[in-house]
Image (cartoon, rainbow, N blue to C red):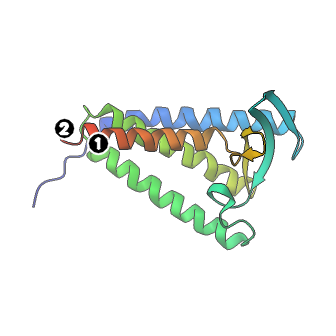
Amino acid sequence: MSKVIWRRHNLVWLWLSFAVFVIDQLSKLFMRHWLDLFQAKSVFPYFSFLLLHNKGAAFSFLDGYGSWASWCLGIITVTICVALINWMLRTSSRRRLLLVGLALIIGGALGNLWDRFTLGYVIDFLLFHYKDWYFPAFNFADSAITMGAFLLIIDMVFFNNER
């Protein structure tokens, strides 16, 4: 059995999680005061701000299933964040790409979790579209989660042998 090395200094990367959380919440607060629900403001021919309330998970999955779905999503989010922090503690400090990816995912997940439990829904407001095609609206937290997942994939594909 190998001994687990805890690298508490890796928790310094949680500053990035906190920054993502703060930027996400500030952007949502601004949009809530600038736009009315379902109101769109076109920025470019293919991009608009559109205020929506997402009561489900990604792409409104589980929307309309009641409060049990919110609690279930909340428990899953907290469990994943604890697992990611554990991963962060066990990772070599040299694997900065992995640590940044984990921090982005944690910050984004906590931003959406905060919405879910303080508002009962997640605020989405970024909308990309082309003619009659619309990508589901999302927010800064979703972007951070996506970028973090991308960094994890890049790290695993190209740098997985580094310890």
How crowded pointer 2 is (Cα within 10 Å; few <14, some 14-19, many 20+) is rated as few
| Residue at horizontal 79 percent and vertical 48 percent from the top | 52
Q: Position of residue 7 (x, y in %)?
A: 26, 41
The residue that mark 2 highlights is 162
Viewed as shown, does residue 124 lie left or right of 147?
A: right
Cβ atoms at labels 1 and 2 below 8 Å apart: no
Asked if residue 116 is positioned above or below residue 129 in the image, the reply reads below
For the C terminus, the image quarter is top left
Find numbered disc 2 in the image and state the secondary structure of the residue it sits on.
loop
Is 128 in front, or is 96? 128
- Location of the N terminus (image quadrant): bottom left
Q: On screen, 88 above or below 94? A: below
Q: Position of residue 19 (x, y in %)?
A: 55, 32
Q: Earlier in the sequence, mark 1 or mark 2?
A: 1
Q: Which residue is mark 1?
A: 157
CA–CA distance between discs 1 and 2? 11 Å
Residue under the image location 71 percent in, 33 percent down = 27
- The amino acid type of the residue labelled 1 equals Val
